[in-house]
Image (cartoon, rainbow, N blue to C red):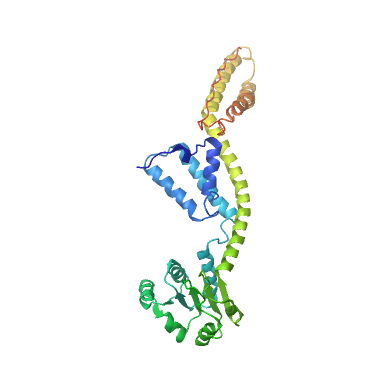
């Protein structure tokens, strides 16, 4: 059983509830700002609630507005344009390799979780030739079976380098595995006309700095990826300010629609009642004191009263109703989060 602890929750109503949900859907409240999966998670939660019969017309409209805001923020800002996770940034490095060399052969050194993530990313990019390397051949074979690749021990890989175009390494080795000599042997075994990539995601580093001095070699390590991730996070924070402006506009639009929906029955009833009173008074007037008017003049009087006079006379009281209803409590400041409650107006019939 899950115990309810009030201190772990907060209650929002009215506009503040809408603002919070819009911010969640736009991934402003997530651990990683701009995370793409958040909107989908909100949609899943909404679908489950609706299946359980917990969604009424108000929640339906609120969540549909939130979905619209989430999409608008992603389209109208760069909040999700730049990667901030190490895996995604590493995938971009690999994507550049594959773009220049679609038949790239890639060696993955290590047996941890990161090796599996890199293998998944490479297969997603269309790389078919994966070579798994580990100090223990059996561990490399386990990965090779899973990802339909080849396996090789680290000793053999260093002693007799196969032809590869990139090495992705993420081991727990206490010191660098690949120095300048190892890198040169790997390049000699490969195609000298093609660029060679070292992607080092190990702590401490598996590839020494002097490897980057070799012609034709690109070295991308965890430090550079972290710096890039930090720069991209700053860009996302700037985009978040733009997103909040969009949310403010959408909250106001949602609020106005909510007010119109709440007041619509009252305004409609008031307009209907006023029109009925006006028509009744016109019938009495045009059949009595103004009976001498021609049919055309009577038609003009009726048209002017019903389409010009009545709507304009009603405009001020209707606006007054809207201002009274649009209070701090309705906008969520009072905490009740309730709907709009407005007293009806009683109109007296005209005396003719």
Tell me where residue 154 appears, x and y as whole percent.
Answer: 43, 80
Q: Quadrant of residue 352?
A: top right
Above or below for 320 versus 10: above
Q: Residue at x 53, y 27 (%)?
A: 268
Tell me where residue 168 appears, x and y as whole percent.
Answer: 49, 74
Q: Residue at x 60, y 64 (%)?
A: 227
Can residue 162 be seen here? The reply is no
Tell me where residue 267 appears, x and y as whole percent.
Answer: 55, 27
Q: Quadrant of residue 145?
A: bottom left
Which quarter shows the N terminus? Answer: top left
Out of 307 and 98, give the one closest to the viewer: 98
Out of 63 and 282, give the one closest to the viewer: 63
Can residue 225 be seen here? The reply is yes
Tell me where residue 180 appears, x and y as whole percent.
Answer: 56, 82
Q: How many marks?
A: 0
Q: Could you tell whether 5 is left or right of 285 in the image?
A: left
Out of 305 and 198, give the one closest to the viewer: 198
Q: Residue at x 43, y 38 (%)?
A: 5
Above or below for 165 versus 330: below
Out of 158 and 38, give the one closest to the viewer: 158
Above or below for 291 versus 144: above
Q: Could you tell whether 265 is left or right of 242 in the image?
A: left
């Amino acid at each position: 059983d899950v115990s309810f602890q009030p201190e772990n929750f907060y209650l929002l109503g009215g506009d503040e509830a809408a603002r919070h949900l819009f911010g969640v859907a736009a991934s402003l409240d997530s651990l990683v700002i701009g995370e793409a999966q958040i909107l989908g998670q909100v949609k899943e939660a909404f679908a489950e609630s609706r299946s359980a019969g917990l969604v009424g017309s108000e929640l339906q409209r609120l969540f549909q507005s939130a979905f619209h805001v989430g999409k608008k923020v992603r389209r109208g800002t760069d909040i999700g344009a730049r990667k901030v996770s190490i895996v995604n940034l590493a995938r971009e490095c690999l994507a550049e390799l594959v773009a220049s060399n679609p038949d790239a052969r890639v060696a993955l050194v290590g047996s941890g979780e990161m090796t599996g993530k890199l293998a998944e990313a490479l297969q997603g990019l269309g790389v078919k030739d994966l070579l798994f390397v580990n100090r223990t051949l059996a561990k490399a074979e386990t990965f090779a079976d899973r990802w339909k690749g080849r396996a090789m021990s680290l000793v053999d890989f260093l002693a007799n380098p196969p032809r590869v175009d990139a090495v992705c390494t993420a081991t727990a080795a206490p010191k660098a595995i690949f120095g300048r000599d190892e890198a040169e042997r790997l390049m000699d075994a490969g195609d000298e006309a093609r660029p060679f990539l070292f992607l080092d995601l190990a702590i401490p580093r598996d590839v020494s700095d002097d490897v980057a001095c070799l012609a034709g070699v690109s070295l991308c390590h965890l430090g550079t990826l972290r710096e890039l991730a930090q720069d991209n996070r700053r860009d996302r924070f700037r985009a978040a300010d733009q997103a909040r402006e969009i949310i403010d506009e959408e909250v106001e639009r949602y609020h106005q629609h909510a007010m119109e929906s709440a007041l619509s029955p009252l305004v409609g009833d008031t307009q209907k009642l006023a029109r009925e009173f006006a028509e009744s008074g016109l019938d009495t007037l045009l059949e009595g004191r103004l009976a001498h008017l021609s049919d055309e003049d009577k038609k003009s009087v009726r048209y002017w009263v019903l389409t010009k006079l009545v709507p304009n006379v009603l405009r001020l009281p209707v606006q007054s109703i809207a201002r009274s209803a649009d209070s701090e409590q309705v906008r969520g400041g009072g905490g009740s989060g309730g709907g709009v409650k407005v007293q009806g107006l009683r109109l007296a019939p005209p005396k003719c």
